[in-house]
Amino acid sequence: MNYRLTLAHINDTHSHFDASLVRLKVQLGQHQFSLAAHTGGYCRIAAQVQQLRKQAQQQAREMLFLHGGDCFHGTLFYNQFKGQANARVLEYLKPDAMVIGNHDIDDGNATLANFISQVSFPVLAANMDLSAEAADKDGALAPLPNLLRFDNATGLGQCLIKPFYDRQMAIIGITLDQMRRVARPDADTEFQPAFATVANTIEHLKQQGIDHIVVLSHLGYDMDKCLAEAVAGISVIVGGHTHTLMGDFNDFGLPCVPYGERINGVPVLHAGKHSEALGIADITFDDSGKVVALNGSSCLLLDRHFMLSGDEPATEQDYRDATEQLHQHPGILWDEQDDQLKAIIDTEFRPALSSMEQQVLAMVPRTLAHTRLPSQRLPHGSEIAPLVSQSMFLAAREHLAQLDFALHNAGGVRQSLEQGQVTLGDIMGRLLPFDLPLVCYQIRGDYLQQLLESAINEATNNSVIGTGAGSFPYTHRLRYFYDGRQPLGERIVKLELLKDNGHWQLVEATALYVGVSTSYTTSGKEGYDALLLANWQQSLEQVTLPGAFIRMLSRDDIPLEPAMPMVNYISHRHS
């Protein structure tokens, strides 16, 4: 007997309640155009999910709506309300389950506990070990009945069991076991090994006669594929963490991978980032829990009205042809929205943000793209992250004259900076939402080389189990050459420092250099362990990451254009 499931999923929404601007490439005859439109947002997602639920009910088909983690941070809706707005909006959407992401616990357990206490749906983290948590402490997680976590009595992960026709379906939520390296959970919170937790829990479920098993993961695309390869008995993996867009969007110029890519027979599903897309899958299982058919895509939820620009002015026929091309694409849906949810957002939360959204700081002459890793389109990586590093350098040098370089992790910059007006809300809420103080430090050259290689290895999973692409380093006045084909410890083949006289100088192993980073990286997160070997660290509590960038925007003598490339990266992994 076969069992059909309609599955809708989102991940890494990062408080993007509103639709986001997307730029697509469209080929119309002999001309290529850039198509600008808004996509996604919670109101559009809500309308689509309600429609899917209605269709599933009419067809007597089971339906799931899942969130792959990281709903916190990313916009002013989080900065201002610290999870309260997220709880209100997600409770309206009513996902069947959500897994905890690293940014959901980035502000400690109490903020997460407050969020979980305000929602009725299950929040999952089967490998979160709270055995050392004091039950009476403020912000305790263990007493929350809708948090499904690691069960120390059985050594298994708690999971959600739902009726599934004449069977049962289990949903196991699994999150990063290296959480302490990427987030800031309380000291009494541990995370058991993810793969072992899933394997042991599945073995127990199989003994109970439960074969239809969904893993709701916040491990990232690469680790999800490894999980599918390493652990037997998984039916499907629904993931998040790496902002991976799945579907066929290559013709539109969007980086993507095939939707439902199968590893060891197990489909892996992701749906991008920032509420821009909704993953929709029609899945057929056999009676043993194996997926025998899967059709679907991540779907952009686009404006019906859009702008075309190119070398030639767009004609009315070009707009009609572009509309037809979009209509024919299986990964394009339209901008129907839930008006009730829009009213909740507009009346309860948006008024508190309006002044910051209206305060214009600068004009950006062209879009400065952000990507965590170098790519074929951007071989030197992000265009905006080096400017953020430059702003850190300029701000810190006002307090410490003997400063040599700035270093920042890719994940600390959240998105591209679009052409046009830049507001305070754009910086504080979207580009640099982490209000982290800057920290200066003195470090030996060999340790500096070590931390750069370590951070890149983690970002690319090159011979190490990484924590995600967010660790990739971007710099100012520090230029590195990384060759991933070399053995561990020898991949930074050249490291240079730009001196005040304009000349590049090789970094010497035993020489001492002074740098500036954020308090996040200087605490040794995400492969930056070598920063803990610094001779000294000095926190500039009065200078924050977004504050430094805002200050640079106000200067007329600093062009908002990337300087010479600081990243020279050979992506081939060591064999």
Image (spheres, rainbow, N blue to C red):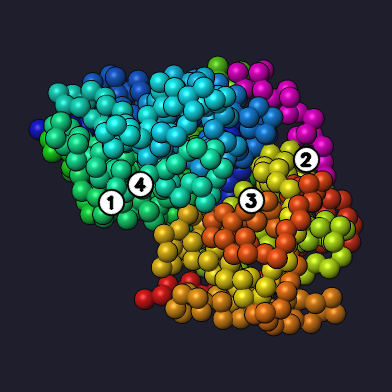
Q: Residue at image x 20%, y 27%? A: 168
Q: Residue at x 41, y 59 (%)?
A: 465
Mark on residue 194? Answer: 4
Mark 2 — residue? 424
Q: Earlier in the sequence, mark 4 or mark 2?
A: 4
Residue 472 falls inside the magenta stretch: no
Marks 1/3: CA–CA distance: 31 Å
Q: Where is residue 216 drawn, in percent x and y? A: 36, 39
Q: Which residues are magenta?
A: 344-361
* Number of numbered discs overlaid on the protein picture: 4
Residue 174 image offset from top left, x and y in percent: 37, 41
The residue pinned by badge 3 equals: 520
What residue is rendered at 43% in x and 46% in y? 176
Reading the image, the residue beneath label 1 is: 228
Identify which residue is drawn at 50% across, 76% down.
489
Query: Real-space Cα distance between discs 1 and 4?
Result: 12 Å
Which-is-in-front pick, marks 1 and 3?
3
For marks 2 and 3, give the one nearer the viewer: 3
Report whether residue 2 is seen: no
Q: Please tell me which of labels 3 and 4 falls first in the chain.
A: 4
Q: Nearer the viewer, residue 541 or 395?
A: 541
The local secondary structure at tag 4 comes to helix
Depicted 90 relative to depicted 440: above or below: above
